[in-house]
Image (tube, rainbow, N blue to C red):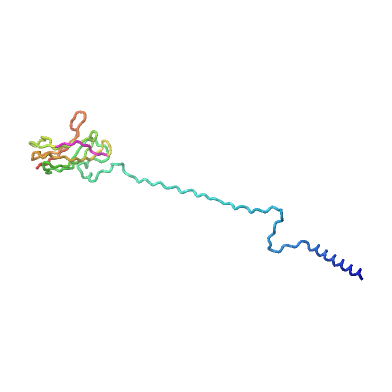
Amino acid sequence: MVNVRFGLVLSLAAAAIATIGCSGAPSASPGATPTPAAGSPTATPPRPTTTVVSTPASPTPSPSAAPTSPAGRIAPAGYAQSCARDIPWGVQVTKPFICLEGPVAGTHVTGGASIIVSGYAGGSFESNVVTEVRALIDREPGVRLASVASTYSAPDVGMPGAWRVTLSIPASAPVGAARVIAHFDNPRDGSVVAQAMVDIVID
């Protein structure tokens, strides 16, 4: 009887060992993340690559230069209707000239007062202009009452230019006719190159 029981225990033990041997290692449950074995190198995820796209800077547009006329080459307002209207502005004169824009003939000025003389000229050496007021004697210039040396302003040498001066008439100036004379001379011999004149009245 003892032998039978002992044999049964041995049989059950053998069956249990056989069952364990057949089943093997427990299988991983579905969806489980495998755990790396101890000592095995841990896999390093690749570093994300950053792509830098350099956008070329937009060129700064240079301001377009607006076409402009050379300085001073635009005729003064009213030049086309002035005493020099037949002389092209901004080009070399072909013949020296001077003309009076003011005063107009017959202008009255009181002794002790001033008179403004203006006009255009071209072809003068160093743009020189001399303006005078002379008393008239028998309709001829006589005593010099006032004189001013000046220059006219032109865009370039040899081109027409404008001038304007103020002359003071002496209080002692003789009453009667007088003449405004504007001229420029030859620097070599002092001869008159060009001149203009207008008669006024001194009161």
Which picture quadrant has residue 153?
top left
Name the residue at 47% across, 48% down: 57
Q: Which of 62 and 203 is in front in this view?
A: 203
From the viewer's perspective, tell me whether residue 70 is left or right of residue 174: right
Q: Which residue is drawn at 40% across and 46% down?
A: 62
Q: Does the magenta stretch include residue 55?
A: no
Give the quarter of the figure containing the N terminus. Answer: bottom right
- In the rendered image, residue 94, in percent from the top left (x then y), is placed at 24, 36
Decide: is 78 above or below 2: above
Camera-side residue of 178 and 29: 29
Give the residue furthest to the bottom: 1
Specify start and end residues of the magenta stretch as a single range: 146-154
Q: In this view, does 49 lie to the left or right of 115?
A: right
Residue 11 vs 174, above or below: the answer is below
Q: In the picture, which quadrant includes the C terminus?
A: top left
* Viewer-proximal residue among 69 and 94: 69
Where in the figure is residue 117, as x and y percent of width and height?
17, 41
Going 51% across and 49% down the picture, which residue do you hit? Answer: 54
Residue 123 drawn above or below residue 11:
above
Q: Where is residue 123 in the image (x, y as percent from the top left)?
A: 23, 35
Location of residue 122 by image quarter: top left
Left or right of 1: which side holds 44?
left
